[in-house]
Amino acid sequence: MENCSHSTVYYGVVNIFLRTAQDPFGAVDVWICTKCRDLFCEDKRWGLTELSSVVGFPKRDEGSKWAILICMIGAEVKWELLEAKPGKQFDHSCVDGKTCPLTVNDNYSVSAAEAQSPSKHSLYLVDGRINRSIIVK
Ligand SMILES: [Zn+2]
Ligand SMILES: [Zn+2]
């Protein structure tokens, strides 16, 4: 994988819906390398007119998996695309604007360092959800 000169083709999309399958919230485009089967993702926001170029996919950490993080406080929701790896810690900016350090667990769930954080966090792996939907409730 390390030495693969990736040759990617479009693989599919993961759609993110809010509450019902009629309320689209976002989507992630997924490409796959035809040689090493590695996945590449691109965050596709609704309302975004200028899509980034397909060339020059960011390099991923060895052993990490593409995942979609949902952050929710009451009716306020945001999502982001990230590279998840068990044990990985990162600073995430919550839907209320506060910084919340998160840790990826062995089962690819996430834990907030601050137990009193008002946000509810869920992590969804992209692999296995291609051409399927995530419905945030
Ligand atoms: Zn490859
Ligand atoms: Zn958050």
Image (cartoon, helix red, strand yellow):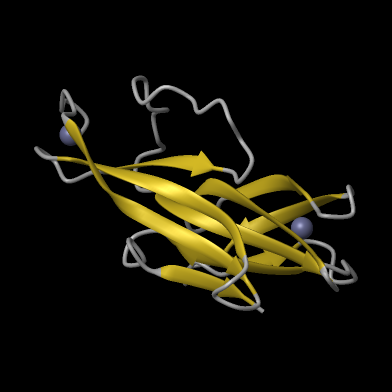
Residue shown at 90% from the left, 71% from the top: 116
In what quadrant of the picture does the C terminus appear? bottom right
Location of residue 38 (image quadrant): top left
- Picture coordinates of residue 101 (x, y %)? 76, 52
- Picture coordinates of residue 61 (x, y %)? 41, 38
Q: Is residue 7 above or below residue 46?
A: above
Location of residue 20 (image quadrant): bottom right
Residue shown at 54% from the left, 62% from the top: 16
- Picture coordinates of residue 130 (x, y %)? 33, 61
Q: Nearer the viewer, residue 7 or 117?
A: 7
Residue shown at 77% from the left, 67% from the top: 72
Q: Nearer the viewer, residue 101 or 27?
A: 27
Can residue 84 be seen in the rendering of this structure? no
- Picture coordinates of residue 10 (x, y %)? 25, 41
Count of numbered circles in the view = 0
In what quadrant of the picture does the N terminus appear? top left
Left or right of 54? Residue 117 is right
Left or right of 67? Residue 56 is left
Q: Nearer the viewer, residue 48 or 112?
A: 48
Return the residue found at the far left. 35
Left or right of 65? Residue 120 is right
Ligand 2 positioned in quadrant: bottom right
Can residue 115 be seen in the rendering of this structure? yes
